[in-house]
């Protein structure tokens, strides 16, 4: 049986070049960078290279900060909680504005802040799942401390008009943060062209290692650290530096940025080929137009087939995808993005997310084109919500 991985918005394989480079810093140059002896100091040139690759990858200025964190969840928590301590708890501001479709590391942190008295406004999305700039204009005010809206959505791949959000925030003197985890490595992220104040990223979403991420902070801004206990990262994030992770993340960023042309041509071509084939199946829907979506992502709803059942059938036949819904408990919960756009209950439980990478092959896509309709047919034949008529019968 083939093994085909199409869940690259959840995580990606580590690029073999990255894995090879990282191995030497786990068995050879393994010293603590803060140690005075040569085992520590010999890692410094490699750390500088890795950090330079991160700065270049997002076109950050040398005067800006990039803080290495353990993951994007830590980065997002750092931003939101620092804004609370620095601007809201001090009485200078009162409100955080975000969207209804943020990653849980933003959404759940905002819920926590609400529980201690912070006002949080959740902006709705339109029919294709993005926040209209006018919606932000209607809500931003003098008491807004921060606007935090993602660059690209993890379920739909829809690309948000971040530059317009930035312009609105700058006009009102409000800080703007974006979770760019689903953008970097899929579309160009240029912080000279789109001057956000704060940006989050994660290595394992662009073929780097798990357990390491980053937080970009524009020159002149200072955030209260989430972690205390050491002088690493200039005292802005304590903890022994993950040399292998930093070196790996830097190279992964460089390789991902260099592959953007391929991502936006060949990967998009394969995505479109698969999407065209899936749309020939009766009663299916793909959310969002292609031109405003990351080039690797499809969120498809298959009428009459629950997402989890579809995933089980695909997995049994060697295809790894993901669902637009999740079992948070014994009760099945609808996909947040489907609910936010006002999808009906049935539609909200049938989303399947397919996400390619630059390592996806045409042979793999051809296999999925062959197997996906078979899975739909099998599951609709036993569905209590879909009127299925076998061939040759009414």
Image (cartoon, rainbow, N blue to C red):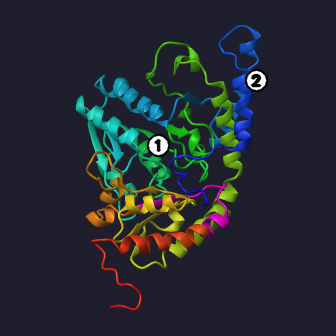
Rendered location of residue 388, percent (x, y): 34, 80
- Towards the viewer: 300 or 343: 300
Report, in whole angstroms, how far the alpha carbon at label 1 lies from the one at label 2.
Answer: 30 Å
Magenta stretch encompasses residue 365: yes
Q: Is residue 344 visible?
A: no
> How many residues crowd mark 2 within 10 Å: few (<14), some (14–19), many (20+)?
few
From this viewpoint, which residue is outermost toward the front?
1
* Residue at position x 40%, y 64% in the image: 128
Of residues 125 and 193, the one drawn nearer to the viewer in this rendering: 125
Q: Residues within 10 Å of mark 1 (few under 14, many from 20)?
A: many
Q: Which residue is mark 1?
A: 178
Q: Is residue 334 left or right of residue 227?
A: left
In the picture, which quadrant includes the C terminus?
Answer: bottom left
The vertical placement of 190 against 387, above or below, is above
Q: Tell me which corner region of the image, top left, top right, bottom left or bottom right, holds residue 111.
A: top left
Q: Secondary structure at mark 2?
A: helix
Seen at 69% across and 16% down, the residue is 31
In the rendered structure, the answer to whether residue 127 lies left or right of residue 331 reads right
* Image coords of residue 219 (percent x, y): 55, 30
Query: Which image quarter: residue 310?
Result: bottom left
Q: What residue sits right under mark 2 in the picture? A: 45
1 vs 2, front mark: 2
Quadrant in the picture for the N terminus: bottom right
- The verdict on residue 122 being magenta is no
Residue 44 seen in the figure? yes
Residue 266 in the image: above or below residue 80: below
Q: Which mark is residue 366?
A: none
Residue stretch in magenta = 352-366
Apparent side of residue 356 relative to residue 340 in the rendered image (left or right): right
């Amino acid at each position: 049986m083939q093994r085909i991985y199409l869940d690259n918005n959840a995580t990606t394989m580590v690029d073999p070049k990255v894995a090879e480079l990282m191995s030497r810093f786990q068995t050879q140059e393994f010293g603590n960078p803060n140690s005075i002896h040569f085992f520590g100091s010999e890692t410094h040139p490699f750390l500088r290279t890795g950090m330079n690759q991160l700065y270049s990858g997002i076109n950050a200025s040398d005067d800006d900060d990039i803080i290495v964190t353990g993951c994007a969840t830590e980065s997002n928590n750092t931003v939101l909680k620092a804004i609370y301590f620095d601007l809201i708890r001090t009485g200078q501001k009162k409100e955080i504005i975000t969207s209804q479709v943020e990653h849980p590391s933003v959404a759940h942190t905002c819920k926590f802040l609400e529980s201690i008295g912070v006002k949080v406004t959740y902006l709705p999305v339109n029919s294709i799942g993005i926040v209209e700039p006018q919606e932000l204009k209607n809500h931003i005010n003098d008491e807004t401390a921060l606007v935090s809206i993602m660059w690209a959505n993890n379920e739909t791949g829809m690309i948000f008009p971040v530059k317009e959000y930035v312009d609105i925030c700058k006009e009102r003197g409000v800080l703007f943060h974006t979770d760019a985890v689903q953008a970097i490595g899929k579309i160009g992220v240029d912080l000279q062209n789109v001057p956000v104040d704060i940006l989050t990223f994660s290595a394992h979403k662009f073929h780097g290692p798990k357990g390491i991420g980053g937080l970009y902070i524009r020159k002149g801004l200072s955030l209260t650290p989430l972690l205390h206990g050491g002088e690493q990262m200039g005292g802005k994030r304590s903890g022994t530096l993950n040399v292998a992770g930093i070196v790996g993340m830097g190279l992964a960023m460089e390789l991902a940025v260099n592959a953007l042309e391929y991502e936006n041509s060949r990967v998009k071509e394969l995505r479109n080929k698969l999407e065209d084939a899936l749309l020939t199946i009766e009663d299916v829907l793909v959310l969002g137009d292609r031109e405003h979506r990351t080039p690797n992502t499809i969120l498809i709803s298959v009428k009459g087939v629950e997402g989890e059942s579809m995933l089980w059938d695909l997995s049994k036949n060697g295809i790894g995808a993901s669902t637009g819904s999740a079992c948070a408990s014994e009760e099945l919960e609808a996909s947040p993005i489907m609910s936010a756009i006002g999808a009906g209950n049935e539609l909200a439980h049938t989303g399947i997310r397919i996400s390619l990478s630059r390592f996806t092959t045409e042979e793999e896509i051809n296999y999925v084109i062959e197997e996906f309709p078979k899975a739909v047919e099998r599951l609709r034949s036993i569905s209590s919500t879909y009127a299925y008529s076998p061939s040759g019968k009414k």
